[in-house]
């Protein structure tokens, strides 16, 4: 099994960059720190940067990820994912549909792991039949990174845990204080933004998350 597939199969901690908390050079140091601390996947979310800066940043993260044998994903942009040799792409409900992503990748003879955001029971159920590798459920708690979305609550996490056939990740306002609540409702993977990239030490934050997610010790 190729290491990319192995890391994806076993992933527990999915970190999403927060460019509001760091300069571009600072985010690269934080990315390195997060991988060292145990993040399995780091997603580049960079909506407000010009494309040239996104490419520069993405190529740098891709290099760091491969050095650590960890995964690098891109948010929304198939072109950015391909230009920066990402391992995966994550799309939202209003982005390029998964079937179209697969069609374009096949046409270009490219392969990407593919994820989809969901915000309701109906969307999560539809995700089971989409040509995706995983889906995200959230925002579980209110979060400033998704101000336009109302939190879906722990109830949706619990319900998805009962019917999900594909790998899935809980996202939205998750930190070390409420992580146990999310895990108790059936999630085994989480995506985290601020609690990692706004932490004084992303490495230490990731170590704490990873210990809890893998049941190694109490934090």
Image (cartoon, helix red, strand yellow):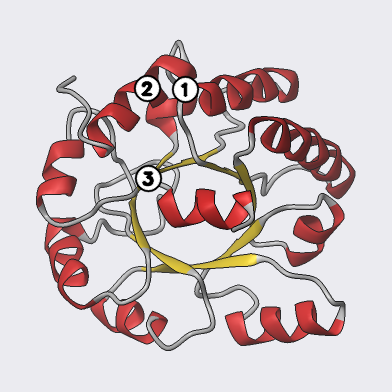
Q: Is residue 215 left or right of residue 167?
A: left
Q: Mark 3 or mark 2, which is nearer the start of the sequence?
A: 3
Mark 2–mark 1 CB contact (< 8 Å)? yes
Residue, disc 1: 37
Q: CA distance from mark 2 to mark 3?
A: 12 Å
The secondary structure type at the circle numbered 2 is: helix
The label shown at residue 141 is: none
In the image, residue 2 above or below residue 96 = above
Q: Quadrant of the N terminus?
A: bottom right
- In the rendered structure, the answer to whether residue 42 lies left or right of residue 138 reads right
Nearer-the-camera pick, 198 or 35: 35
Q: Quadrant of residue 124?
A: bottom left
Quickly name the residue at label 2.
207
- The answer to which of marks 3 and 1 sits earlier in the sequence is 3
Residue lying furthest top: 200
**First along the sequence among labels 2 and 1:** 1
215 or 41, which is in the foreground? 215
Residue 185, how many percent across, how many down? Answer: 11, 55
User: Is 77 placed above or below 95 here?
Assistant: above
User: Element under label 1?
Assistant: helix
Q: Which mark is residue 12?
A: 3
The answer to whether the residues at label 3 and label 1 have Cβ atoms under 8 Å apart is: no
Which residue does the image show at 14% across and 22% down from the upper left?
218
Mark 3 → mark 1, Cα distance in angstroms? 13 Å
Determine crowd level at label 3: few under 14, some 14-19, many 20+ residues with C-alpha closer than 10 A.
many
Q: Position of residue 137 (x, y in %)?
A: 33, 62
């Amino acid at each position: 099994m190729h290491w990319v597939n192995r890391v994806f199969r076993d992933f527990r901690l999915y970190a999403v960059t927060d460019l509001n908390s760091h300069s571009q050079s600072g985010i690269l140091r934080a990315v390195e720190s997060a991988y060292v601390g145990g993040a399995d996947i780091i997603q580049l979310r960079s909506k407000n940067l010009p494309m040239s800066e996104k490419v520069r940043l993405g190529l740098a993260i891709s290099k760091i990820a491969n050095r650590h044998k960890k995964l690098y994903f891109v948010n929304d942009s198939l072109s950015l994912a391909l230009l920066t040799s990402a391992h995966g792409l994550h799309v939202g409900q209003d982005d390029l549909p998964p079937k179209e992503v697969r069609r374009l990748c096949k046409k270009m003879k490219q392969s990407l792991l593919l994820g989809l955001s969901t915000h309701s029971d109906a969307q999560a159920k539809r995700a089971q039949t989409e040509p995706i590798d995983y889906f995200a459920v959230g925002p579980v708690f209110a979060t400033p990174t998704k101000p336009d979305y109302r939190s879906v609550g722990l109830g949706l996490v619990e319900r998805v845990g009962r019917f999900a056939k594909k790998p899935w990740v809980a996202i939205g306002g998750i930190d070390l204080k409420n992580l146990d609540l999310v895990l108790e409702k059936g999630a085994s993977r989480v995506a985290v933004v601020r609690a990692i990239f706004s932490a004084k030490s992303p490495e230490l934050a990731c170590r704490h998350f990873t210990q809890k997610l893998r049941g190694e010790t109490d934090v």
